[in-house]
Amino acid sequence: MDHLDFFSSSTPQRPSWGVTIGALVLIYWAGNIIYNLYFHPLAGVPGPRLCAATRLAFLKSLITGNRHHDVKALHKIYGDIIRTAPDEVTFVREDAWHEVLGPTAAHKAFPRDKTFFQTPKGQPTNLVLECNVEEAARMRQVALPAYSERALMRQEPRIQAYARLMADRLMERASASEKGTVINVVDWANWFAFDLVGELAFGESFGCLEETRAHPWVELLFNSLKFLTLATTTRFYWGLEGLLMSLVPRSLKKMQADHYNTAVERVRRRVSDSVDRDDFIAPMIDQTNNPNFERMTMEEIESTMSLLLIVGSETTGTTLCGTLNNLTQHPEQLRRLEKEVRGAFEREEDMTLLALQNLPFLNAVISEGLRVCHPLTAGILRRAPKGGATVCGIYLPEDTHICLSVISIGLSEKNFHRAEEFLPERFLPDGLRPAEFDNDQRSTQRPFGAGLRSCIGKSFAMAEMRVFLARLVWKFDLSAAPGKPVVWGDLKGYSVVEKVPINIVVKPRYFE
């Protein structure tokens, strides 16, 4: 044997850089897990050990679209306050609404979670995604006049016109058969909501109801939300978001850009229109309300309207789909709604917004629909403010991720009797509500959020849902279509519920 060979074979080999780095990463990972489990300020908060140790369980849940299901299941096991990730706590207690979303003597309102609320690269900030409380308040004050009760009354003719168009187009289809016709209510609810928000936002419809077919934007909207939700999973680890964006196909990037550019084009066309329109944009470009665009720039208006198009249509359409799915699966509830609407009006044109507000069971149906079919699966997402804060007796260090799970709150047996069942009568006024629901915690229901960042379009959403449902049960007899029913609680969610076709039978009502 060569002396050099002998020397080389007997001398210990130095570990490679790869092995060294791998060992350091492993040590860091193990140390981080030990810290999260035993020494982290949130170590005493109940929850699964796996969730406390690492965020991987959270990310898997989010990517598969099961986040809202998993959180609901965990609350049943561990209680009202749970640790769903090393630096995240989820609440289903009423106190949390006040302590997180409203300023208190101890702290300011919690800011939105920047991990989830980020303006797409290259786009100006906007009212929907802005996390800074002061900046959001500035833009909200400019937009607020467009969403007031007075503005809603001015927009009633438009809302009624699209509800009437929806009913007329349905009648054309349903009249072809004495037994009625099967429709996918997901299409019709989305068409109604999408056309109406286009009219109210830009002064022009997308023509979905007129042509009884989807506009290319309808599919793009959900795909955009789904992509943005999946993109957030990379923001918990440095460098991954940039890597993901580099792998996104050009076609998808083009779709995203086309959506924004088309919205901007419509805003600019609306602004340059010489016709004096009363719509969502009007207060934003009014020189007395927004002089020289100093309170809200044109770029911020364009960016805001591109997002309000999604928020204003997808959420309303989804709630209508879930509510109708439940109504047709509960014929006794549907018959009660039909009786109330048909008994309250002699003519269809008498169903004004003010008149519909006074129908207790219609309002109860919508409230119950929002409880069991809430469109936002992500929940209300905030971060603990600078210096940390205490919520429901739990100290949360600065930047702790906080989630108010609207779906889990609504479906909690601690908050509602027979929580998994669709029972609108639980929301009837005192004197009409059955005694079995006396202990329901109805005050926990804030489907439109609370505080300074509550949904600016709440009044419009409620009006749209009342008109849509009332017109539908006035003109048609509805029933579930043959086949396997859709279980709403099984649907996946990527920020909003991922809907599947919901087929119902629509048969024209014959008036005497």
Image (cartoon, rainbow, N blue to C red):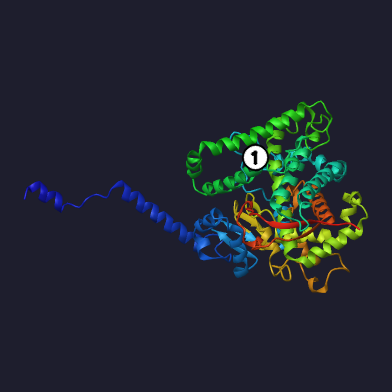
Q: Name the quarter where the C terminus is drawn.
A: bottom right
Going 70% across and 45% down the picture, which residue do you hit? 311
Q: Residues within 10 Å of mark 1 (few under 14, many from 20)?
A: few
Q: Residue beneath label 1, please? A: 216
Asked whether the viewer can see residue 297, the reply is: no
Left or right: 155 in relation to 498: right
Going 66% across and 33% down the picture, which residue do you hit? 262
Left or right: 378 in relation to 438: left
Picture layout, residue 131 above or below residue 50? above
Asked whether the viewer can see residue 285, the reply is: yes
Q: Residue furthest bottom?
A: 436
The percent coordinates of residue 53 (x first, y second) are 49, 60
Going 64% across and 35% down the picture, which residue do you hit? 260
Q: Residue furthest left?
A: 1
Going 79% across and 67% down the picture, which residue do you hit? 332
Residue 284 or residue 196, whichever sits in front: 196
Left or right: 46 in relation to 510: left
The count of marks equals: 1
Q: Amino acid at mark 1?
A: Pro
The percent coordinates of residue 107 (x first, y second) are 70, 52
Q: Residue furthest right?
A: 346
In which image quadrant can residue 217 be found? top right
Residue 285 or residue 422, whichever sits in front: 422
In which image quadrant can residue 132 be found? top right
Left or right: 165 in relation to 419: right
The percent coordinates of residue 454 (x first, y second) are 74, 49
- Helix, strand or loop under label 1: helix
The percent coordinates of residue 73 (x first, y second) are 60, 66
In which image quadrant can residue 94 be found? bottom right
